[in-house]
Amino acid sequence: MNQMIIDGQKIDAANQQTLDVINPTTGQVFTTIPRGGAEDVDRAVKAARKALKGDWGKVPAFERGRLLMKLSRAVMDHQEELAQIEARDTGKPLSTARNDIAVLSRYFEFYAGGADKLHGDTIPFLNGYSVQTVHEPLGVTAHIIPWNYPAQMFGRSVAPALAMGNAAVVKPAEDACLSILRVAELALEVGFPAGALNIVTGLGEEAGAALSRHPGINFISFTGSNEVGVLIQQAAALNAVKCVLELGGKSAHVVFDDVNIDLAVPAIVRGIVHNTGQTCTAGSRLLLQKGVYDRFMQALADEFAKTRAGTPEMDLTCGPVINRKQMERVNRFIEKGRQEGLKVVAEGAVAEGVPAEGFFVTPTLFAAERHESELLCQEIFGPVLVVVPFETEAEAIELANATDYGLMGAVWTENGGRQQRVARSMEAGQVYINSFGAGGGVELPFGGVKRSGHGREKGFIALEEMSTIKTIVHHHGA
Ligand code: NAI
Ligand code: MG
């Protein structure tokens, strides 16, 4: 039995309805959340507006930074409690959940430091004029958060918004929102004024749709599926507000003959199996040059075969996927790969002793002869990696870009010129050279091109995304 947080109060949905929350490890209901709807969203947006006009709007930038730093510390003081909540809600291994909470804390810390450091300009203009630019909050920011990294995504989206003095209304995913509700309580405890941060739980098509369409919001941040991303942008258009969309990817590793195999193999396996493949930046395609193909594939298969899916407490490579629908989706892709004649090169395993009703899938490594399969086009969001051979650098670049998505990529080679050429040619928002998605990367601007979305999160640039510039032109005479 959980409650939403609106205007500093813990409350039920106006309609008193609830949704069951299922533990993905057991497939069993373990608690409920309010089934918030349009009425609750409206209340939250009004509370946020009131906060902007009242206490929250008066907090100076450095004090906002101090509040964020206090929240960062409070999160680490509650790391184990939050990690346990996150692991039960999502099924992820406890060590992954602990790391996610540390990254959440880091987001608050990073943007705490940034809150008073986005300076405006003075601009040379006509004689007798002084011109300045001032960064102002956008106003009420709406944040629709996915279920794969609830705590991390919350920090990524909300910390820069609060740092810039916006008031936030957050709609976490119905599948996993408990860590977010707990962090919002901590925010009240460390002194964020009522209404600065509001959480409305509920279904995407109810609470989420109502929030994205609400005429009282000034901005939408969304991470999730392509399908819903399009709806969000349409909703943003209705009110002519800006949106930042992060819509997943089909990220490719490009591995050349001179690859450092010992370095690449563990990073590539981790890059697809971590979080059971439910990562927007998962490296789900591997383009492998023919000269190293056999040797690399052998090492990759050996490493891949060691992967184990288990319960959070077993703390293995990964956990279950989030829900039955996602389990069926991943299994459908694996089945489709087999039907298409892709070769199963290696499989991980589901550990013995996991609950029979849990949403576990088998990590699967496929080899394809050509870059043609549906498994190479669509985001599977599971621990499924497909390897495709190539001969030349030009061919590798063409294949790497042969997708509608453009979120991330990696190039593995010791040749410096090639590192730079391939990195520059990849259509992606982030490219790694001889590593992959290491750590939280809170400092690193992040986002997509093509259907992976637009706008940038993380790094200092998020502060610009979450604010607007006012130009003040002062005519005082020469
Ligand atoms: P989804 O896009 O439906 O859910 C993401 C968030 O959007 C949730 O908070 C959900 O409540 C909300 N939402 C859903 N419908 C909405 C609507 N009409 N208006 C406003 N908000 C709405 O994602 P879903 O269906 O859970 O997963 C399907 C696929 O989406 C996955 O297999 C994966 O490929 C992709 N996905 C990508 C993520 C990423 O990190 N880029 C995260 C989650 C899903
Ligand atoms: Mg959906």
Image (cartoon, rainbow, N blue to C red):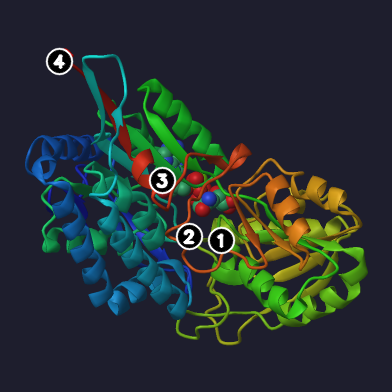
Classify mark 2: helix, strand or loop.
Answer: loop
Which of pointers 2 and 4 indicates the residue nearer the eye? 4
- Asked if the residues shown at circle 1 and circle 2 are in contact, with their CB atoms under 8 angstroms apart, the answer is yes
| Residue type, mark 1 in image | Gln
Q: Is residue 155 left or right of residue 192?
A: right
Front one among 305 and 1: 305
| Residue type, mark 2 in image | Asn
Q: Indicate the position of residue 447 as horizontal and vertical percent values.
A: 52, 47
- Asked if the residues shown at circle 3 and circle 4 are in contact, with their CB atoms under 8 angstroms apart, the answer is no
| Residue type, mark 3 in image | Ile
The residues tagged by marks 3 and 4 sit, at their Cα atoms, a distance apart of 33 Å
Q: Which residue is mark 2?
A: 148
- Residue displayed at 7% across by 38% down: 54
Classify mark 1: helix, strand or loop.
Answer: loop
- Residue displayed at 60% across by 49% down: 407
* Image disc number at residue 135: none
Asked if disc 4 is less than 8 Å from ligand 1, the answer is no
- Residue displayed at 27% across by 27% down: 470
* Image disc number at residue 278: 1
Q: Does label 3 or label 2 sit earlier along the sequence?
A: 2
Asked if disc 3 is less than 8 Å from ligand 1, the answer is no
Classify mark 3: helix, strand or loop.
Answer: helix
The residues tagged by marks 3 and 2 sit, at their Cα atoms, a distance apart of 24 Å
20 relative to 470, above or below = below
Q: Is residue 447 left or right of residue 215?
A: right
Q: Does label 1 or label 2 sit earlier along the sequence?
A: 2
Q: Which residue is mark 3?
A: 461
Front one among 194 and 399: 399
The residues tagged by marks 1 and 4 sit, at their Cα atoms, a distance apart of 58 Å
Q: Which residue is mark 4?
A: 476
